[in-house]
Amino acid sequence: MGGLVAIGTIMSMITLTPFFIVLFTIVFMASIGKSFGVRRLYVNLLVKIFEFGRQNIEIVRQQQYANITRSEPEEDELPATDSTDAGKPDVEDGSSGKANGILPNGNTRHKLSNGGGDAPKIVNGGNSVISRAESLILSPEVIDDTRSKSTELGESGNQHQHQHEDGEEGDREGDAESDGSGEHEGTGFKLSNCLDYVKSGMEAIIEDDVTSRFLAEELKNWNLLTRTNRHYEFISWRLTVIWMIGFLIRYFVLMPMRVLICFIGVVYCVIGFAIVGMIPIFQLRRMVNDIVFKHTFRMITRSISGVVRFHNPQYKPKNCGFCVANHTTPIDIAILSTDCTYSLIGQRHGGFLGVLQRALARASPHIWFERAEAKDRMFVAKRLKEHVSDPINPPILIFPEGTCINNTSVMQFKKGSFEVGGVIYPVAIKYDPRFGDAFWNSSRYSMMQYLFLMMTSWAIVCDVWYLPPMYREEGESAIDFANRVKSVIAKQGGLVDLVWDGQLKRMKPKKEWKEKQQERFSKLLKGE
């Protein structure tokens, strides 16, 4: 019995000692903001494995397609061909399909654009089937001369020509039916007036611009995760072996280590900020807070194998201003806080987030609201002005969208932070979904479920661009300023710039939007 205990002790030392050495090495390197480059090598290796998997999937699909095509003449009992066709291969469509870049499952290798003209494309996995004009008639804002603008943009020129021709035919029919009455002439009614609404309605049924932004971004290639629900892991024995090895690594090696690193980071956060809050000298407390703040979020970022590339460090946010970024996940805060210290603003939470909020508030000025206070715009604006009026306060990190978007687009910015005044530091964040989907679908997953998905992903890889500071111009409204900042962020991140409010994720469209469109259509009918 004693021999078994000794053998067990030796085995545990052999296995656990290297594990804890690696663990504390990661924590130490994270705390000082350094890296051996292992994560980047790991990400590059994953890219090669994903490419190998893609090639295997394509080969198997082509074989399946060829077998199906080859068996079709036998099943259908096709008549014998002429002697001139006797030497031709049975599978002409299959070979020509490959030559044209058509995959066996019916998809093409061409990446579909998400919009017409110069609209930005979704880089990874954009599957949009609708190409809309920039002057979409059913947008929240009233847009005049929609048809003429669409025509100038050259969007679907032939379709517009047919619409106008149909409209003219309808006018002639209407004139014939209303001979002498002048009913249609008096109101200025044309059948073509409603075609834009019909077209927009059909586009929304096929694929609307809003709900697709709250779903996980689809990937062009399989990333060896079963979350795609396509059962690629069983398509060939090679992929099955690779997937099983990856499963064991993610769940039995990476996840335990990541959970421990995250736990160490949270404990460090609670204890560190409690100590910082007791330092009486303000300048010393601020300096130590800056160190503890970055250390905490670097550990949390390492707990999800985060690989972050920062660009344009000369535009890094300074004190007494607003850092404005697009929002994909609560991890956005951790990603940005690895490089700069911020004051955070948001609603008070309970649970895991509540622990972090209370710890942060002990050491530095953060703005946390109760639910009732957050609805009081004047109260929020007052708190923001008080914060930015003090030049020694850190910049406030704000996500004006108000909800998480799937990192394919940027939706409407709330104007509150743009009314206060002061400098705005735009920041664009773009995640690479091949290694793990960072988007938090809060209507589907709880915070703990989401963290579990993050811990069992391959990695979280993203690029962060600091952009030149922006100021509100004289005579510019807060809404126009917000839209200008949003446009800059969308362009840099390669995201689609949308006018829709992200709160449509949880609520119905505003009554005012419907009334604006009804009023505009009534004017169109009256000929105004």
Image (cartoon, grey):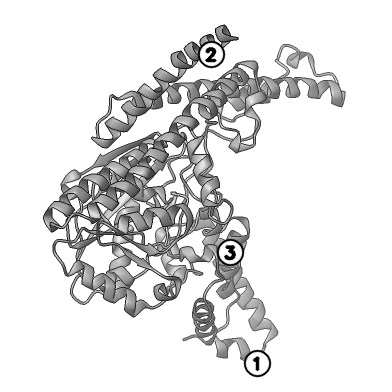
**Residue 323's x, y, as percent?**
26, 57
Contact check, label 1 and label 3, Cβ < 8 Å: no
Label 1 residue SS: loop
Label 1 vs label 2, nearer the camera: 2
Label 1 vs label 3, nearer the camera: 3
User: Around disc 3, counting alpha carbons within 10 Å, would you say few (fewer than 14), some (14 to 19), or many (20 or more)?
Assistant: few
Residue identified by numbered label 2: 8
Give the CA distance from mark 2 to mark 3.
71 Å
Residue identified by numbered label 1: 180
Q: Amino acid at mark 1?
A: Gly
Residue 234 placement: quadrant: top right
Label 1 or label 3, whichever comes before in sequence order: 1
Residue at image location 74% in from the left, 16% down from the top: 85
Label 2 or label 3, whichever comes before in sequence order: 2
Residue at image location 66% in from the left, 31% down from the top: 231
Which of 347/163 is in front?
347
Q: Residue furthest top?
A: 3
Query: Which corner quadrant holds the N terminus?
Result: top right
**Residue 148's x, y, as percent?**
43, 68
User: Around disc 2, counting alpha carbons within 10 Å, would you say few (fewer than 14), some (14 to 19), or many (20 or more)?
Assistant: few
Label 2 vs label 3, nearer the camera: 2
Which of 138/431 is in front?
431
Q: Amino acid at mark 3?
A: Lys
Which of 446/235 is in front?
446
Compared to residue 277, the image places residue 78 above or below, namely: above
Residue identified by numbered label 3: 199
